[in-house]
Amino acid sequence: MSIFSIPVIETERLILRPLTVEDADEAFEWTGDERVARYMIYSTHESPDITRQWLSTVDKLENEYT
């Protein structure tokens, strides 16, 4: 099992799964929020494209170690 292997958890009302590049627009809602980003290791994202690039990098790292 990879160190990046994250299970999908499903209930009747909720699905928890790893983020994908397709989630960029939704993820930008919090990656672009200064109130959230100040507690994270990344700086505030200026656009959904920045978030898309970030998610692409995370995806490449995950695929490298699976």
Image (cartoon, rainbow, N blue to C red):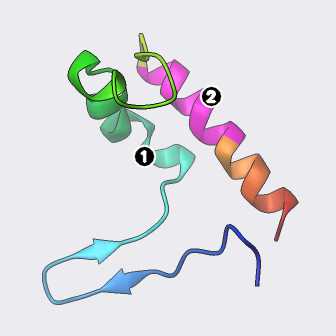
Residue at (73% x, 58% y) in the render: 62
Q: Residue furthest right?
A: 64
Residue under pointer 1: 23
Measured from the top left, where is residue 66 in percent x and y? 82, 71
Measured from the top left, where is residue 4 in percent x and y? 67, 67
Q: Is residue 66 above or below residue 55?
A: below
Q: Residue furthest top?
A: 46
What is the quadrant of the N terminus in the image? bottom right
Dot 2 falls on a residue whose secondary structure is helix
Q: Amino acid at mark 2?
A: Gln
Q: Amino acid at mark 1?
A: Asp
Number of the label disc, if any, that sits on residue 50? none
Image quarter of residue 52: top right
Image quarter of residue 14: bottom left
- Mark 2 closeness class: few <14, some 14–19, many ≥20 residues within 10 Å: few
Please tell me which of labels 1 and 2 falls first in the chain.
1
- Mark 1 closeness class: few <14, some 14–19, many ≥20 residues within 10 Å: some
Q: Is residue 64 left or right of residue 6?
A: right
Q: Is residue 2 left or right of residue 44?
A: right
Dot 1 falls on a residue whose secondary structure is helix
CB within 8 Å, label 1 to label 2: no
Q: Residue furthest front?
A: 39
Q: Which residues are magenta?
A: 48-57
Residue at (43% x, 69% y) in the render: 17
Residue under pointer 2: 53
Measured Cα–Cα span from mark 1 to mark 2: 11 Å
